[in-house]
């Protein structure tokens, strides 16, 4: 990585008070996400977006003389722009960011979502593996109880770490229910189903959603949710392993 890029990345990380390996950093989800993108690309980055109510969201220091490209959310809806330092693969970085933004408002949410919640690096790594393996995956969240705690979002593709489970999450975890909902005018199927470890034991709830190709039956995407769940199960020896350091 070139020296200017290293300096730019260091300034971004210092400016938002983040360390990529930190367990309980304070800030916004967008700050953490942009810091990781800057680390990956080796360049300074800046996001200008608006939430669904029209409120502006600016992430990262201004980038002078950079390349500006459109930024979308995980469903492909335009939410703003990404500006990257010259010589950066801005479009590829924008695509990487988009997979990790469910709605623009995610960027302004606190990270962790609940004060005191701790990031689980092993669970985070599994989310990244699933995003790479399943290109039609829109959102992914592991609702699992850490040792000594209650059901929370332990890892996800859109932040909200530490958010307590709701009645649907408990219904899935405790009763083995499978919940399906077609949203976004039929273009997205959300499926929540029990999260399993490699022995087949239920250890929480897994929230997924997928894009639905035009003209196809949304319910047929259910098989994709099962495929994600099974791929995760093979990589989870136990609930405790998700939170191991």
Image (cartoon, rainbow, N blue to C red):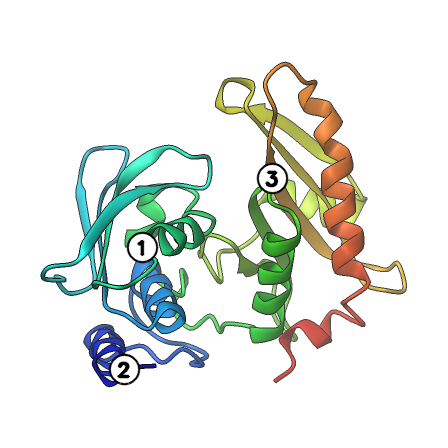
Residue 107: % across, % down:
32, 52
Marker disc for residue 6: 2
The answer to which of marks 3 and 2 sits earlier in the sequence is 2
Q: Is residue 102 visible?
A: yes
Picture residue at 30% right of the left edge, 62% below the top? 88
Residue 236 versus residue 196 in the image, above or below: below
User: With 89 as the anchor, is 147 left or right in this view?
Assistant: right
Residue 91: % across, % down:
35, 50
Q: Quadrant of residue 96?
A: bottom left
Which residue is the extreme one toward the top? 215
For the residues bearing labels 3 and 2, Cβ distance under 8 angstroms: no
Q: Quadrant of residue 156?
A: bottom right
State the quadrant of the N terminus.
Answer: bottom left
Look at the numbered disc 1 and give the secondary structure of its residue. Answer: helix
Residue 221: % across, % down:
71, 31
Q: Which residue is mark 3?
A: 136
User: With 4 as the anchor, is 196 left or right in this view?
Assistant: right
Q: Is residue 194 visible?
A: no
Q: Nearer the viewer, mark 3 or mark 2?
A: 2
User: With 222 as the anchor, is 27 left or right in this view?
Assistant: left
For the residues bearing labels 1 and 3, Cβ distance under 8 angstroms: no
Q: Nearer the viewer, mark 1 or mark 3?
A: 1
The answer to which of marks 1 and 3 sits earlier in the sequence is 1
Q: Which residue is mark 1?
A: 90
Marker disc for residue 197: none
Look at the numbered disc 3 and give the secondary structure of its residue. Answer: loop
Which residue is the extreme one toward the left? 64
Picture residue at 68% right of the left edge, 30% below the top? 180
User: With 108 as the anchor, is 214 left or right in this view?
Assistant: right
The answer to which of marks 1 and 2 sits earlier in the sequence is 2
In the image, 169 versus 243, the foreground residue is 243
């Amino acid at each position: 990585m070139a020296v200017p890029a290293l300096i730019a990345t260091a300034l971004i990380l210092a400016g938002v008070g983040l360390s990529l390996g930190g367990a309980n950093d304070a800030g916004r989800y967008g700050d953490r996400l942009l810091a990781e993108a800057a680390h990956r690309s080796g360049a300074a980055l800046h996001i200008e977006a608006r939430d669904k109510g029209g409120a502006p969201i600016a992430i990262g220091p201004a980038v002078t003389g950079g390349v500006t490209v459109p930024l979308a959310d995980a469903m492909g809806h335009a939410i703003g722009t990404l500006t990257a330092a010259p010589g950066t693969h801005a479009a590829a970085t924008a695509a990487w960011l988009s997979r990790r933004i469910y709605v623009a408002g995610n960027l302004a949410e606190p990270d962790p979502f609940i004060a005191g919640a701790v990031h689980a690096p092993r669970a985070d790594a599994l989310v990244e593996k699933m995003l790479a393996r399943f290109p039609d995956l829109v959102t992914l969240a592991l609702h699992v109880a850490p040792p000594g705690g209650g059901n929370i979002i332990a890892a996800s593709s859109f932040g909200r770490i530490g958010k307590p489970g709701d009645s649907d999450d408990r219904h899935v975890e405790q009763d083995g229910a499978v919940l399906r909902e077609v949203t976004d005018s039929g273009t997205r199927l959300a499926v929540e189903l029990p999260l399993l470890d490699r022995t087949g034991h239920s250890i929480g709830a897994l929230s997924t959603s997928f894009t639905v190709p035009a003209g196809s039956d949304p319910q047929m995407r259910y098989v994709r949710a099962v495929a994600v769940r099974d791929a995760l199960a093979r990589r989870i020896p136990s609930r405790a392993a998700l939170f191991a350091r």
